[in-house]
């Protein structure tokens, strides 16, 4: 894996959930409030069960096995079935979940300050598979909307990461056309890294959990702190205050 410094990158394509924003924090909050709204508390075990079901559904979306319209209610249908919960209005629960998910956020690893410090030095874009209304709300509330040079959401693009169509669309709509100057940064090997590699783009895996890469997708860079992006860009580390 490459460790040398480079200053060739003019553009960064940032993933959102698990990279810029702490998705686990938002997911816990939204799910807890949704269960309270139907008169039931959710346990830690049940939160973990939902996280596994949700991850599985998103992986199936990445593989093209299901559509977003099937994913959104399907994960809750699977959860309620596993918990023996009958009579829950899945559509209403799903809508409440998405609304809540878009109204709370937690900045991950100084990401906002880092992106602000890079303004004017590199072009920065968001690439995300999340629900459009939810992602736009979170990005606006957190301040990322004002920093980014563009936002690419799979629902609006018409295909999810890692599909080649998604990345080709992004490449058509950004300023930089030299692929070697565009860096994909994200936490998902099967979405961000796979998609970037298939599109012929340099990739940087944000592995803040110290996970083992047991996939065929080998990123050009691996970092456990977003602050290491300065090393990759060949830029001095600023005082982020």
Image (tube, rainbow, N blue to C red):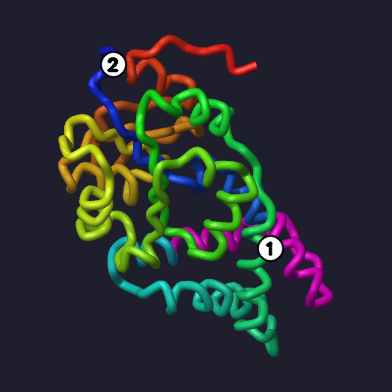
Q: What is the x, y in percent for residue 188?
A: 39, 45
Secondary structure under tag 2 reads loop
Residue at left offset 25%, top offset 29%: 220
Q: Is residue 116 magenta?
A: no
Q: Which residue is mark 2?
A: 3
Give the magenta part as a residue range. Answer: 29-56
Q: What is the x, y in percent for residue 158?
A: 31, 68
Left-right relation of 42 to 127: right
Residue 195 higher or lower than 68, as above or below: above
Q: Quadrant of residue 86?
A: bottom right
Q: Is residue 49 magenta?
A: yes
Secondary structure under tag 1 reads helix
**Marks 1 and 2 in Cβ contact (< 8 Å):** no
Q: Earlier in the sequence, mark 1 or mark 2?
A: 2
Q: What is the x, y in percent for residue 150?
A: 40, 47
Asked whether the viewer can see residue 200, the reply is yes
Q: Which residue is mark 1?
A: 100
Residue 43 higher or lower than 175, as above or below: below
Q: What is the x, y in percent for residue 149?
A: 40, 42
Residue 235 higher or lower than 137, as above or below: above
């Amino acid at each position: 894996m490459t460790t040398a410094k480079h200053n060739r990158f003019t553009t960064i394509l940032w993933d959102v959930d698990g990279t810029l924003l702490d998705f686990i924090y938002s997911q816990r909050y939204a799910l807890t409030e949704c269960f309270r709204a139907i008169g039931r508390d959710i346990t830690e075990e049940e939160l973990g069960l939902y996280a596994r079901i949700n991850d599985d559904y998103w992986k199936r979306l990445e593989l093209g096995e299901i559509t977003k319209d099937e994913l959104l209610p399907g994960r809750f249908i699977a959860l309620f079935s596993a918990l023996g919960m009958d009579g829950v209005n899945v559509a209403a629960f799903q809508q409440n979940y998405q609304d809540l998910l878009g109204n709370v956020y937690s900045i991950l690893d100084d990401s906002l300050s880092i992106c602000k410090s890079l303004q004017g030095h590199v072009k920065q874009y968001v690439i995300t598979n999340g629900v459009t209304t939810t992602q736009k709300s979170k990005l606006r509330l957190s301040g990322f909307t004002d920093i980014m040079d563009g936002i690419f959401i799979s629902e609006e693009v018409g295909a999810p990461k890692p599909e080649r169509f998604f990345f080709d669309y992004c490449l058509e709509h950004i300023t930089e056309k030299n692929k070697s100057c565009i860096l994909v940064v994200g936490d998902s090997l099967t979405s961000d890294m796979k998609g970037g590699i298939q599109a012929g783009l340099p990739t940087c895996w944000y592995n803040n959990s110290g996970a083992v890469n047991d996939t065929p997708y080998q990123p050009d860079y691996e970092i456990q702190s977003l602050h290491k992006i300065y090393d990759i860009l060949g830029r001095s580390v600023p005082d982020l205050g």
